[in-house]
Image (cartoon, rainbow, N blue to C red):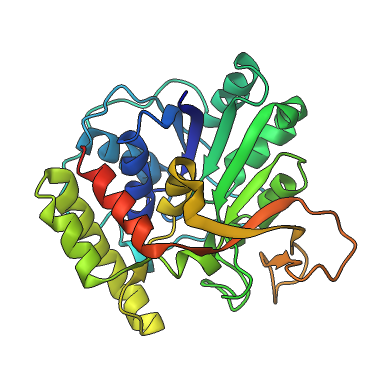
Amino acid sequence: MTPRKIIIDTDPGQDDAVAILVALASPEEIDILGITCVAGNVPLDLTSRNARIVCELAGKRAVKIFAGCDRPLGRDLVTAEHVHGKTGLDGPDLPEPTMSLAEGHAVDFIIDTLRENAPGTVTLCPLGPLTNIATALQKAPDIADRIAKIVLMGGGYFEGGNITPTAEFNIYVDPQAADIVFKSGAPIVVMPLDVTHKALVTKARNDAFRAIGSPVGIAVAEMTDFFERFDKEKYGSDGAPLHDPCVTAYLINPDLFSGRHINVEIETQSELTMGMTVADWWGVTDRAPNATFMNDLDADGFFALLTERLARL
C-alpha cells in the first residue's frame, strides 16, 4: 500500500498533538509532506511552537513546519486558553523546541505542494480553523481540483456547538474560511462533534496511554489529564472528547467511522448562529451533497489504534 500524502493544518492543542503523533507513527499509511500552523486554540506564535515541540517529542525533527495565518479572514481571533491552557499544550513539562520553522508561508507551501504533485494525490487534514486552507483556495483557485480530499475536524449537528449553542470552535473562529472550503468543490470528509463526543478518554483509556511507559505515552496521558478537566466538568461525562485524532484514525482505518454524504452549509450572517454547520442530514433540501458528514465511530477500536500507534514512538 502506498502511503497517503498529506498536509496537516493545525493549531496545537493537546488533541491536535495526539493526532500529529499518531500520524508520525504511521508511515505505512501516511506520508506527512509538511505541517502548516494557524491561529486558533492559541495565537500563531504558540501553535507554531507547539507543532515543533510535538515533532521533537516524537523524534521527527525532519518534518517541515510552516507558520501560516495569524488571524481569521474577517473577524477578530477567538482563542481557547480556557480549555488548552495558556500555552495550548499545558499538562506535560516539555522542553522548548530547538528545530526551526521552515522558510516561507504555510499558504504558499499548500499551494506549491498541490501544484507540484499529481492531481488527486495530496490530502489536506485541517485540525483547526480553516483560514490557511481558504486563503490558499482564494489565492490559487486552480488547486481545488487538485486536492484528493479534505479530511477535517469541525462542526456539529446532533451535538450542537461547544463554543456557542450552535457552533463548534474551529468553524466559529473563522466561519468565512469554512464557507469558502465547503463551497470549493473539493471532496470533504467531516469529523464533527457528533463523532468526537463519542471518542471519550476514560480513565482506563488514559491509563493505557500512560502504561506505554515512553516519553510519548506519558506526555499524551498528561496532556489528556489536563485537557479533560474542562470537558468532564462541562459535560458530566466519564472523559473528555479526543477530537482531532479522529482525522488521523480515519486516514488509517476509515471503517472505524460511519456517516452520510450530505449538504453542509456554513452560517456567516447571523451572530446568533454564527459558524453553525447547517447539515442537511435528513435530505430536506434540494441542495447538492458536498461533504461526507460522520456521526458515529467504533470507540474501542479507535482507542486501540491510537494506543498501538503511540507505542511505536
| Residue at point 68%, 68% (across, down) | 274
> What residue is rendered at 77% in x and 47% in y?
183
Residue 19: x percent and y percent?
A: 38, 47
Report x, y in % for residue 153.
Answer: 53, 54
User: Closer to the camera, 74 or 188?
Assistant: 188
Q: Is residue 115 above or below residue 300?
A: above
Instruction: Name the outermost residue toward the right.
Output: 286
Q: Residue at 21% across / 30% down in the picture?
A: 59
Give the image location of residue 304, x and y in percent: 29, 55
Please say whether residue 69 is visible from this viewpoint. Answer: no
Residue 226 position within the rendered picture, expressed as x and y whole percent measured from the top left: 24, 65
| Between 32 and 65, the one nearer to me in the picture | 32
Q: Tell me if 168 is positioned left or right of 26 in this view.
A: right
Image height of 272 relative to 296, above or below: below
From the viewer's side, name the closer residue of 193 and 77: 193
Q: Residue furthest top?
A: 116
Q: Residue at x 25, y 51 (%)?
A: 307
The quarter in which the C terminus is drawn is top left
Residue furthest to the bottom in view is: 236
User: Would you identify the image quadrant in which residue 58 lies?
Assistant: top left
